[in-house]
Image (cartoon, grey):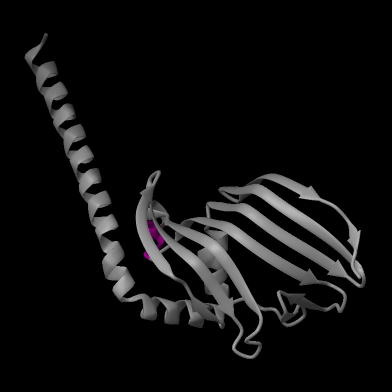
């Protein structure tokens, strides 16, 4: 074998080994961040509450690596309206993945994955233009999401996934239960591909 070719192969293997070691170090550091983030749990709750304009709490925060993305998982997430304290949206697990490539391009944190697992919603559409979502009054005519927040979490989002979602659509005395077993929305440069497995049935409420 030619000496030059041997040197090229040796350098390629060395580069590959360095990449593997670097990847392992990054994963280790990322997982080690979990205790540090848990110590700042109150600050994280405050930031989320400001973004959503609702009180946000969660029991545990975990950092990990999934595929080619660092991820943060929030367990037992609760979103409560300060004006309607009895109304709460509860999610068993919420996982947010960071899109490293687009984050570097746009010089801001851009999520590549939003995964929601375990959510029950009661949506009352009887009194349009207002909706009641788990008791939260939502006026569709006044709903104007923050442009930068929407751009960051939805327009640039690569994957939106749902598991174990139950929705009750209520209108007058009729109720439509929808069970989303699995749903996956992929954003391929502005072209969306949706895969969903659902089960439905109509019943009359008392």
Left or right: residue 65 compared with residue 132: left
Query: Going 77% across and 70% down the picture, which residue do you hit?
Result: 123
Q: Quadrant of the N terminus?
A: top left
Which percent across, then down, holds residue 114? 52, 57
- Place residue 34 in its image quadrant: bottom left
Query: Going 39% across and 59% down the picture, which residue do you hit?
Result: 103
| Residue 105 on the magenta span | yes
Which percent across, then down, holds residue 139? 75, 81
Q: Is residue 154 above or below residue 142?
A: above
| Residue 9 on the magenta span | no
- Provide the residue span drawn in magenta: 103-107
User: Number of labelled discs?
Assistant: 0
Q: Is residue 167 above or below residue 6?
A: below
Q: Quadrant of the C terminus?
A: bottom right
Left or right: residue 101 compared with residue 142: left
Which percent across, then down, holds residue 22? 20, 45
């Amino acid at each position: 074998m030619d000496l030059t070719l041997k040197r090229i192969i040796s350098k390629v293997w060395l580069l590959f080994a360095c990449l593997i070691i670097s990847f392992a170090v990054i994963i280790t550091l990322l997982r080690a961040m979990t205790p540090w983030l848990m110590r700042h749990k109150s600050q994280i709750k405050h930031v989320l509450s400001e973004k959503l304009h609702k009180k946000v709490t969660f029991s545990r925060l975990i950092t990990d690596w999934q595929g080619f993305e660092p991820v943060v998982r929030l367990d037992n997430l609760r979103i409560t309206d300060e004006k309607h304290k009895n109304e709460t949206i509860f999610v068993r697990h919420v996982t947010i993945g960071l899109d490293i490539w687009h984050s570097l391009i746009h010089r801001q944190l851009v999520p590549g994955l939003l995964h929601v697992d375990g959510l029950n919603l009661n949506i009352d559409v009887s009194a349009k233009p207002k909706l009641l979502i788990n008791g939260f009054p939502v006026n569709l005519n006044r709903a104007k999401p923050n442009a930068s927040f929407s751009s960051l979490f939805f327009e640039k989002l690569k994957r939106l996934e749902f598991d174990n979602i139950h929705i009750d659509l209520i209108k007058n005395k009729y109720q439509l239960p929808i069970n989303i077993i699995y749903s996956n929305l992929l954003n391929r440069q502005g072209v969306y591909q949706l895969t969903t497995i659902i089960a439905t049935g109509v019943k009359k409420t008392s």
